[in-house]
Image (cartoon, rainbow, N blue to C red):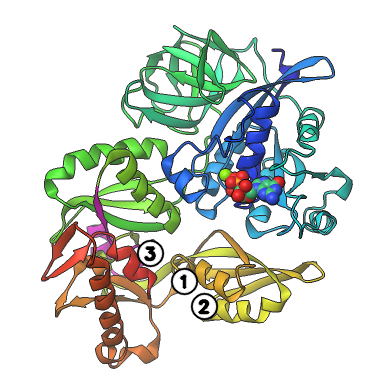
Amino acid sequence: FSVENIRNFSIIAHVDHGKSTLADRLLELTGTIDKTKNNKQVLDKLQVERERGITVKAQTASLFYNCEGKQYLLNLIDTPGHVDFSYEVSRSLSACQGVLLVVDANEGIQAQTVANFFLAFEAQLSIIPVINKVDLKNADPERVEKQIEKVFDIPSDECIKISAKLGTNVERVLQAVIKRIPPPKVHRKNPLKALVFDSTFDQYRGVIANVALFDGVVSKGDKIVSAHTKKTYEVNEVGVLNPNEQPTHKLYAGQVGYLIAGMKDVTEAQIGDTLYLHKQPVEPLPGFKSAKPMVFAGMYPIDQSEYNNLKSAVEKLTINDSSVTVHRDSSLALGAGWRLGFLGLLHMEVFNQRLEQEYNASVILTTPTVPYKAVLSSAKLIKEYREKEITIINPAQFPDKSKVTEYLEPVVLGTIITPDEYTGKVMMLCQARRAVQKNMMYIDQNRVMLKYLFPLNEIVVDFYDSLKSLSSGYASFDYEDAGYQTAELVKMDILLNGNPVEELVTIVHNVKAYRKNVLAKCYGGDITRKMKLLKRQAEGKKKLRKIGNIEVPKDAFIKVLRTQ
Ligand code: GDP
Ligand code: MG
């Protein structure tokens, strides 16, 4: 394929607006998969994706399409839409020149539509707006067109109105991909320059790296070098994803495909790494911003004899999901384990579920916490900790007030889109979560977009659920990292039958009135509720773990936190 006939694009959208369904239709139209009634979210391969009906991993597929007598190669990268996985979206985008921005014709622009649009816009990609689900009874594509014009400044005549479900107008989407998205800017004569934009681990074949070739050619037998580790490998296999792996002789600049090169250690295929030919080094491509974990939790095997199995499962899963950070940790009650960092609570639950389903591992997860910071007060302490500002990812290690001059908490900039009849309630909810309003804008006659600065710990657990329930499900929410702010923080111990449980320590914002009779007033009530919950959880659950003098079911920690 000459480069002029290649298009690399991604589909981005708010969750449930129809990305995966559109991908199915594109695969069918191009003959990549057979047209049967059973093609449902074909690219969602993971069991957890099928069960939850969401896309977690971005997937790649190469499609062949004939347009006006010319044969084109279209590389499609499907992406997840949930806020926790926006990291996957930006990774996918780095291998693309354009995107299909899918918007539901009934729901209109939602918070993640806005977030995803800006990811593509900042990456200077061509953006094709696609209004999906026009077959729905309540579809109002004209209204959505106007929203797109107002919020994104894209003329409404650029919108393509489709039904991914019925296949209506999907052909026009393919034509627009060819006409409006430029071919990749690459040089085949230059030495190889390949970007690793994703990697998966296969038990039998080792690491499979998904690559986008910016320059040059790579073939089986080539010696390649990782710019990150400087290690050399021999290429065993190259190929395209169709959407399953299909070996080819070579991969050329402009193509997206996979490469297997005997990388066995899961840390060897760094996402964002550049691969080049042995003795032909190139300037590495700019790596990605590494994913920043927003939620930390301890993870322990239910039974310490399972430690080594769990260790290898965690290692293998983190190669599939490099946004999880791993630190070794240990606890009195639970033994040796890890402290893991996740992008959000859903991300944490999905990781846990994948450990169980794909590796048959059972674990205990402790109360999630956000990464707080403390500025230490004395030179002696700074020497002891080896830095002035420490990050606390384990609440049990929270330094008390006598040791610090200032505590800091992470903050995020949140975007909320809601029908205006709920604006008052939404504002009250935000205030109750210590949020500061930054902006407010009508995106059409009766829908409002609000921007708030939130302390991260106020939204990480149940904010989304509260927002959904007060708006009858209509408000949507997305957020981005916004640094740190000063905060009054205190450590809160939780007692089970009179004994403090290190694994249940949490850090809370210091509300002064709570201070006096802490036990009687709030924790007393809280703990009874929690105890009841723990009991209820215990029923019907076989795997229990003794902590102190209480039996706690293995996933009760998340449930306990959720009920606060
Ligand atoms: P994703 O989260 O963006 O990948 O969305 P999915 O492709 O998984 O679709 C979410 C839901 O919307 C599924 O139940 C689809 O069947 C449904 N859906 C997708 N496209 C259409 C459409 O054009 N019309 C209708 N009525 N439903 C659709
Ligand atoms: Mg999907």
Q: Where residue 458 is drawn, which disc sits there? A: 1
The answer to which quarter of the image holds residue 202 is top left
Do the residues under discs 2 and 1 have CB atoms within 8 angstroms? yes
Quarter of the displayed picture in which ligand 2 can be seen: top right
Q: Amino acid at mark 2?
A: Arg
Q: Where residue 434 is drawn, which disc sits there? A: 2
Q: Where residue 15 is drawn, which disc sits there? A: none
Q: Earlier in the sequence, mark 2 or mark 3?
A: 3
Residue drawn where x is 86% and y is 50% of the image: 156
Give, as a single range, the part of the protein colored magenta.
Answer: 362-385
Mark 1 C-beta to ligand 1 under 8 Å: no
Alpha-carbon distance for marks 3 and 1? 16 Å
- Residue 448 lies, in percent from the top left, at 73, 70
Alpha-carbon distance for marks 2 and 1? 8 Å
* 459 vs 274: above or below: below
Horizontal side of 309 relative to 34 (left or right) equals left
Q: Secondary structure at mark 2?
A: loop
Do the residues under discs 3 and 1 have CB atoms within 8 angstroms? no
Residue drawn where x is 67% and y is 59% of the image: 110
Mark 3 C-beta to ligand 1 under 8 Å: no
Q: Nearer the viewer, mark 3 or mark 1?
A: 1
The residue where tag 3 is placed is 373
Q: Report crowding for label 1: few under 14, some 14 to 19, many 20 or more residues within 10 A (C-alpha).
A: some
The answer to which quarter of the image holds residue 236 is top left
- Residue 218 lies, in percent from the top left, at 53, 12
Mark 2 C-beta to ligand 1 under 8 Å: no
